[in-house]
Amino acid sequence: MKIEWFGHSCFRIDDSLVIDPYKDGSVPGYNLLRLSADEVICTHEHADHSGRECVELSGNECPLKIDSLPSWHDDQQGALRGPNTVFVITNGTEKLVHLGDLGHFPDDELLAAISGANYLLIPVGGHYTIDAEMAAKICEAAQPKTIIPMHYRWGEHGYPEIETLDLFLEVIKKTTLVDRVAIQSLEN
């Protein structure tokens, strides 16, 4: 499975699917997105996750299987920030899970659906999503083969109120999962 990160929570999978493109100017420090794919999906309708207009669609059918699972953007069943969708994506041999702006520990049903993924794309910056500690607990419970952190601040990129990746890396070092963390580089 080919995974490209374009910053914040935006990824392209196998050149076919874009997840959570951010609208122009919605995330401090990031360049404008201009991507192409067969399909675009968004975990929720906040501007930093719903820039569908930034993706040119090919007109081809996306070959990936996509399952949508309901969740919340906060730990109060959406009362603060609304709903969130978790996407489970498979290509026939590998399973990728994009947690979007998950704001709570998954219930048993959601945890079962995301467990054992080849790739778990998980927010780690806190404030608007789960924080580094909760992200590590979810990773321990879900046991993904590879952890890809997202939705964090680095340099001038990202919201000033969210944490940097460093905090998550410090927390995850205390677990047996540290060797599963894949950090993608991004040059803007």
Image: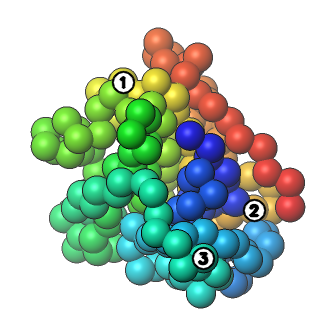
| Residue at 31% in and 63% down | 85
Query: Residue at position x 54%, y 79% from top?
Result: 59
Whole-percent x, y for residue 159 in the image: 64, 66
At mark 3, the secondary structure is loop
Which residue, given by chain and number where applicable, does mark 2 sit on?
A: 157
Outermost bottom residue: 53
Q: Earlier in the sequence, mark 1 or mark 2?
A: 1
| Residue 58: assigned label | 3
Secondary element at tag 2: loop
In the rendering, at what x and y percent does residue 129 appear? 43, 57
Q: Amino acid at mark 1?
A: Gln
Q: Quadrant of the N terminus?
A: top right
Question: Which of the pair 49/2 is nearer the observer?
Answer: 2
Task: Determine the residue positioned at 40% across, 67% down.
Answer: 43
Give the amino acid type for the residue marked by disc 2 in the picture: His
Q: CA distance from mark 1 to mark 2?
A: 29 Å
User: Would you call the spot at circle 1 few (<14 residues within 10 Å), some (14-19), or many (20 or more)?
Assistant: some
